[in-house]
Amino acid sequence: MARFIYTLAVLTLLPWAILHLLWRARRQPEYLRHWGERFGMFGAVTPAPSHEGIPLRITIWLHAVSVGETRAAQPLVAALRQRYPDHRILFTHMTPTGRATSEALFGDSVERIYLPYDTPWAMRRFLHHYRPQLGFIMETELWPNLIAACRQEKIPLRLVNARLSQRSARRYARFPALTREALRGLVAVGAQSSDDAMRLEALGAQDIRVTGNIKFDIAVPDAQLALAREFRLRYGKRPVWLAASTREGEEVLVLDAWKRVMRSGIPLRDGAGDTAALLVIVPRHPQRFDEVSRLAAERGFVVQRRSDDTPVAPSAQVLIGDSMGEMFAWYASVDVAFIGGSLLDFGSQNLIEAAACGTPVVIGPSTRNFAEVAREAIACGAALSIGDADDLVTQVNVLLADAERRRQMGDAGRAFAAHHRGATARTLELISREAR
């Protein structure tokens, strides 16, 4: 009965979903593409890629909602390819940026589509069309009709790299019967932390193991390190700090706080000279690149953009990182990194990549999405916590003036990332022998 009521609600909301796609397409025209997939309508099955001349079967399916989940899947994809070299991999996404990320990371070696909206018939068409032998949902996306369809078709589905904040747990707890049915339809759950496992178990999940965070297993690509060196040459000798994956409303706070410091006559500088620091802002969502560039210019900053593909002018004060797939390079090229999504109540973005690059991390008060990771990074000295934008600018200024402390934080970050590796191997232990 709970799932029947849920299905009626989904049907009622489908017209709104269409309006939502049209609204989002104002900024991201990609939302106008592949609509049929979102409603369970697929064309002919594309010819399967081959391995040593033998066609690969589509048997392994990973659902990664957007950018973060897709990037997190990299070590798992590599491990699955090694274990099942004769199997084809299918990605499903919900956002154009997630789809673009899988294309940038994996190219034509995987197939990618949008996951249909969660109606029983659309999910059945999806499963009958692609016929996966096993599936993985990255992090936490519970689609009751999808899970029920997998169970009916005897397709083992696992929730991996699972995380569940207290806020999300409270939301799921409002629909106890529906949530319990969905969680018990999974054959196994690999949780990032003991806190995540406890909250999932309280909601009804079974066969839960704490496998850790797969994001710790992502190696810094050599190409990104080379690009970081190129970025560093473009900056010149000036100190550089990064506001990474910022969300709407945060850039204004950061820019205004920096402006106040600069007007006070104490601009951000390194400890040895009088070269004013460069602020790099990389917004979380690409449709906001123009908006953030405009916000900086309106405040009187001299703005340059990554897409200019030229050395940063000595007069430039703000560089907008208007690129996709270069976050490792940004982290590895700067002296200090602030993690966006943490200054306002967004729950924070992932700090693991910055720590793995050996870059000192500054993080705001909102860390619910990565609460345990943030606590441990702060405790080991890889990161420090700030309360607001003025505190952020003050602490960044202190770090830029103290090379030894930056070195210590960077070393702590690398050690922190290395200590937590191994989640991919533990996740693979959740798989029996369904894919053969």
Image: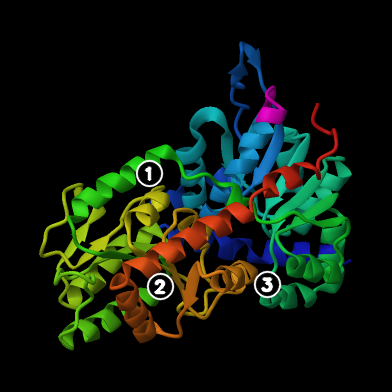
The question of residue 85 being in magenta is answered with yes
Circle 1 residue? 225
Q: Position of residue 129 (x, y in %)?
A: 71, 33
Judge whether residue 199 can be spotted in this image: yes
Q: Label 3, on which residue?
A: 165
Q: Amino acid at mark 3?
A: Ser
* Amino acid type at image mark 2: Glu
Residue 386: give x, y in percent of width and height: 45, 81
The magenta stretch is: 82-88
Q: At 74% from the left edge and 35% from the top edge, which residue is drawn?
A: 132
Res 288 visible: no
Res 202 quadrant in image: bottom right
Q: Of tags 3 and 2, which is closer to the observer?
A: 3
Circle 3 Cα neighbour tier, 10 Å, few/some/many (<14 / 14–19 / ≥20): some
- The quadrant in which residue 258 appears is bottom left
**Numbered disc 3: secondary structure:** loop
The quarter of the rendered structure image containing the C terminus is: top right
Residue nearest the observer in this picture, 184 or 354: 354
Q: Whole-percent x and y of residue 11?
A: 70, 61
Q: Quadrant of residue 150?
A: top right
Where the N terminus falls, by quadrant? bottom right
Q: Residue 233: image x %, image y %?
A: 21, 49
**Labels 2 and 1: the sequence-earlier one:** 1
* Mark 1 surroundings within 10 Å by alpha-carbon count, few (fewer than 14), some (14 through 19), many (20 or more): some
